[in-house]
């Protein structure tokens, strides 16, 4: 009996934690939509211990809003590593890679996202506002620092290449 009660309490605790985490993610989405980025960061960070994937997703959207696409991509790739089966993460990676001129990576995630299920909580967020592959490819640009880093590597100057990569 005690074992059953403990398991039941564990399930109830997990459901309560999930609801609280979902509420924090929704709060972060609302703050992000209102451009209250500090509030969005705080809400996303509160959700991280219970739902690291959703927290990372929100932090990536915030990083993009702060015009740091490389950081946004790194956060999304970490979220994707932790949960490779979420369409919204693959869609965001599609958009951001295309926007910075990473066509191959963008195509990979665009193809992948067609086979992935949606996660309703993440679908509620502003990630859909990023647009799709073709929208971002058309409006995207070549990654200036990446191009310069590759040029430095071709010229045999790995230190300058590393500097350019860090500048991004």
Image (cartoon, rainbow, N blue to C red):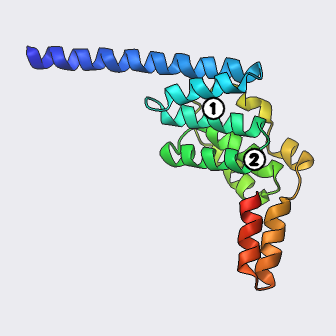
Q: Position of residue 77 (x, y in %)?
A: 60, 49
Q: In which quarter of the image is the C terminus?
A: bottom right
Residue to which mark 2 is pinned: 69
Q: What element carries label 1?
A: helix
Count neighbours of disc 2 (C-alpha within 10 A) and say few if under 14, some if 14 to 19, many if 20 or more.
many
Query: What's the residue at 51%, 26% (across, down)?
Result: 46
Q: Position of residue 114 (x, y in %)?
A: 66, 42
Q: Is any part of residue 124 visible from this angle?
A: no
Query: What's the residue at 76%, 82% (across, down)?
Result: 157
Residue lying furthest bottom = 156
Toward the viewer: 152 or 163? Answer: 163
Q: Quadrant of the N terminus?
A: top left
Toward the viewer: 20 or 87? Answer: 20
Name which quarter of the figure residue 153 lies in.
Answer: bottom right
Count neighbours of disc 1 (C-alpha within 10 A) and say few if under 14, some if 14 to 19, many if 20 or more.
many
Query: What's the residue at 50%, 27% (across, down)?
Result: 47
Q: How far apart are marks 1 and 2 (CA)?
A: 13 Å
Toward the viewer: 123 or 16? Answer: 16
Residue to which mark 1 is pinned: 58
Say left or right for 61 vs 140: left
Name which quarter of the figure residue 128 lies in.
Answer: top right
Query: What's the residue at 70%, 35% (across, down)?
Result: 61
Which of pointers 1 and 2 lies earlier in the amino acid sequence? 1
């Amino acid at each position: 009996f005690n074992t059953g009660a403990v398991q039941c309490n564990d399930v109830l605790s997990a459901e309560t934690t999930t609801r609280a985490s979902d509420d924090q993610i929704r709060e972060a989405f609302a703050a992000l939509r209102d451009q209250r980025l500090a509030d969005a960061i705080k809400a996303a960070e509160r959700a991280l211990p219970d739902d690291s994937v959703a927290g990372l997703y929100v932090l990536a959207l915030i990083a993009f809003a702060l015009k740091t696409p490389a950081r946004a991509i790194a956060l999304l790739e970490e979220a994707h590593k932790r949960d490779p089966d979420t369409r919204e993460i693959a869609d965001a990676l599609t958009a951001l890679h295309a926007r910075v001129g990473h066509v191959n990576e963008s195509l990979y995630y665009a193809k992948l996202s067609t086979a992935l299920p949606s996660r309703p909580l993440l679908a509620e967020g502003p990630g859909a506002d990023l647009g799709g592959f073709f929208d971002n490819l058309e409006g995207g640009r070549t990654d200036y620092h990446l191009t310069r880093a590759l040029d430095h590597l071709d010229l045999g100057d790995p230190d300058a290449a590393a500097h350019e990569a860090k500048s991004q």
